[in-house]
Image: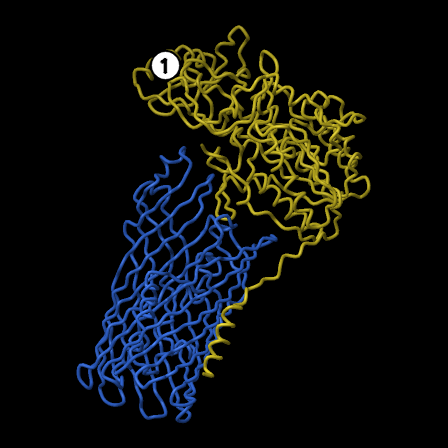
Chain colours: A yellow, B blue
Amino acid sequence: MKYRYLIYILSLAILTACEPKIDEFSPSKGSADFTTYLAFGNSLTAGYADNALYSGGQENSYPNILANQFKTVGMQDDFKQPLMPTNNGVGVELISTGLFFHTKLILGYATDCLGQQSLAPVFADPDASQSDLQTQLFTSVANQGPFNNIGVPGLKSYKALSVICQSNLYYARFKSPDANFVLEEIPKINPTFFTLWLGANDVLHYAMTGGTNDSITSMPLFSSSMDAIITSLTQYDTKGAIATVPHITSIPFFNIVPYNAIVLTDQALVDTLNLGYAVYNAFMEAMGMEYRINFQLGANPMVIADPTIPLPDSLAMLKMRQIKNTELVLLSIPQDSLKCAYWGSQIPVPDQYILSESEIAAISGAIDNYNIKIKDLASLHPVALVDMNTYFNEFKSGMVFDGINFNVKFIEGGLFSLDGIHLNHRGYALVANYFIKDINRTFNANIPLVNITDYPGTQFP
Amino acid sequence: MRKFIYIMLLFAIATWSVHAGGYQVRLQGQKQTGIGLIGTPFNYGASSMFYNPGALSMMKNKYDFSLGASFIMAKVVFQKDATDYQAKTDNPIGTPFYFYGAGKITDKLVVGLGVYTPFGSSTTWDDDWAGQMLIQNISLSAIYYQLTASYQINEKIGIGAGFVYATGKVDLNKALPYNNSKANLEGNTGNIGFNVGVYFEPNNKFSFGIDYRSKIIMKMKDGDATFTVPSALSSNLPKDNKFDAELPMPANLDFGVAFNVNEKLTLAAEVNWVMWSTYDSLIFTFKESGDLLNSANPREYKDSWIIRIGGQYQLNDKLTLRAGGYYDPTPTNEKYFNPETVSLNTTGLTLGLSYQPIENLTIDLSYLHLFGQEAEKAYEPDNFSGKYKTQTSIPGIGISYSF
């Protein structure tokens, strides 16, 4: 039957049903040379997250993500990072008794002083021994170097060119034997392309002590330090990218605890507090000062210590006031003291947990000036400007990428890690994409972006 | 024969996929499919119930039965914007089917029952693909049951109308932006509609047809929503939830003309106005955690005009050959192109043949190939964009029996 052939032909056509094809992405390096890449910066560059440096965080650091993408445009060598030996990693805090070492934070359940259990950041291994953690941090990995990612957690601009950075445990861990400070690590790699994102710690350390300790790096010092760093990085007309400093007062660390965290539901307690502060109010009125402390049912602004109130030291106990809604409470404030030890109502919250209006202004002013300097450097050198400050500002009102919503809120915002300061893996992937976009634009390159969904967000239990 | 019918019935529980014209599938007769999916100006027996109930009254025999199915093999490729990432769908073979039975009550009045599947879509992306937060996989299907009456006013004009009861079901999965989290939405529903048509054959050279099928809105009530999330989030997102949603099956207005060049050759043309603009947004309302979950997802489809041409040639008493083509512009909106329904501007080419081994029996074969034009699309609410391209092969088989 001859019609059978028609059926055969039809079947054949169906079996070979063509696969639709779209031209593949064609990467190009443009006018830049990505053969050897070096990342210079602080904790954000190191891949620090969840209040620790840990291997999983480092593997998802934005420089490591960038390096993977640079491979498509001619990056030759391995991108070496001073990886921590464990995925729980090590963080370190200076407390009254000395250094306290801990693992990274994970989301778990914590019980507060009222016996209430809630979802909260907890140490991944609360029983990790101090000596084990110290061993991880104190064991030099210099023999595995030199490293392409020389991001140092806690690094300030001027410390990069001073021997004092040797006291930084994270730097000491990978310091090359014949280098004296971070800047001297650059020639070990001799990069053909670099990224530089530095400056946050020049204000962050001050901000994290509520302005009571440390200081904001002065503009001349920041300026000269950055000059020295960029000069060293661009020594052979090396191209690169330099990022601005985000306004740190928008990060969760300064925005989780509300200024009016004192919620009163009992009129008797309100009356007692107001009676207690009647003397304070009368005194302030007599002094001709405008400070008043009043409580009512509902949410009340905290009472905070304010050493700047112009009273003699003999009256130090009266140097307190209610916090303004424009002022910020730090995440480091002991929550149990707020809930159970009358902080903020009967006892003023210590100054180290508060950023006052003037402190916020000082921080903002410094960042604005740093960013002017950074943009200046970008215009004077063959580098791409990555205006991370502008990008981060956009997250305040919320952003969406590939169906995932991001904002600057703690945990639910999806951008920041559990320390409320550093980014989570997805956040670092977004940073990498911003770098790529600006590098592509500046050097007429075509480096592929990464898929945000490939990077994990905060892990819920 | 019995085995054949049995296989056909199996398809009734299967779903299908097509990547042209939103989620509409006009594969309701193999003869019509072969000739560019033109049906309005033809009297192709019982299958006219779908294409033009007015033509049904022109049926030659007393009884006419028609049964068939198509096999949709659709492939989609996606190239994500500014990345070197490509993804392909792994869609199941879709199987729209039809069954029609019609009989003459009097010389002028024909009644009939039809069961067919004019809407459906099935798209399966990898669970971990880049668009996982928008859609992982979806299958939509609708089965229409139609009671039809057709009346021959005179030898030149027939009119007809059908009452439709439609059932629909949806099953979709998408990832949620938490670790190992996903949502599954599943539901069934039903609603009613109608179609009307007029068939006009002024002389033996020309025939005309006009057909209107009403919009049917599939209103999903208390569908099952299952959320798989970490235990810490289970109080915010309860595992078992219910949802309401509605999806419109748009109205169609079709106008077709056929011209008999000679005794053997017929040429035809048709336009379909598909009123997709009714599909404005996809709104989900949840019984629990509504403030967190309820969403209005813009689609903003626009009406589309499909233009079709085709021809058939009667080779001999036993064999008729058909071919056709059409252009089906996408009804989707540039800004709201969601990978759940990858509908591109599509060109369709068709081939078909009818073989009549004995006088009462016809076996119909068709083959349709769809070329979805490569296009850059975005779903802006989710900031998800890239290039899409599709290719679809659809062979079909059917039989008609009349006496």
Q: Mark 1 lies on which chain?
A: A
Count how many numbered circles sit on residues in the image: 1
Q: In which quarter of the image is the C terminus of chain A?
A: top left
Residue A263 placed where, x, y %?
37, 23
Q: Does residue B371 appear left or right of residue A215 in this picture? A: left
Residue A215 placed where, x, y %?
64, 22
Residue A242 placed where, x, y %?
69, 40
Residue named by callout 1:
A273
Q: What residue type is labelled 1?
A: Leu
User: Which of the 4 image quadrants contains residue B155?
Assistant: bottom left
Q: Which residue lies furthest to the left in this view?
A: B106
Q: Does residue A423 appear left or right of residue B294 in this picture? A: right
Q: Residue at the location (36% across, 84% down)?
A: B357
Q: Residue at the location (55% across, 59% down)?
A: B387
Q: Say above or below: B380 vs A198.
A: below
Residue B52 placed where, x, y %?
31, 78
Q: Say above or below: A389 vs B18.
A: above
Q: Residue at the location (34% across, 46% down)?
A: B225
Question: Between A454 and A184, which is closer to the camera in this rendering?
Answer: A454
Question: Between B128 and A283, which is closer to the camera in this rendering?
Answer: B128
Q: Is mark 1 on a helix, strand or loop?
A: helix
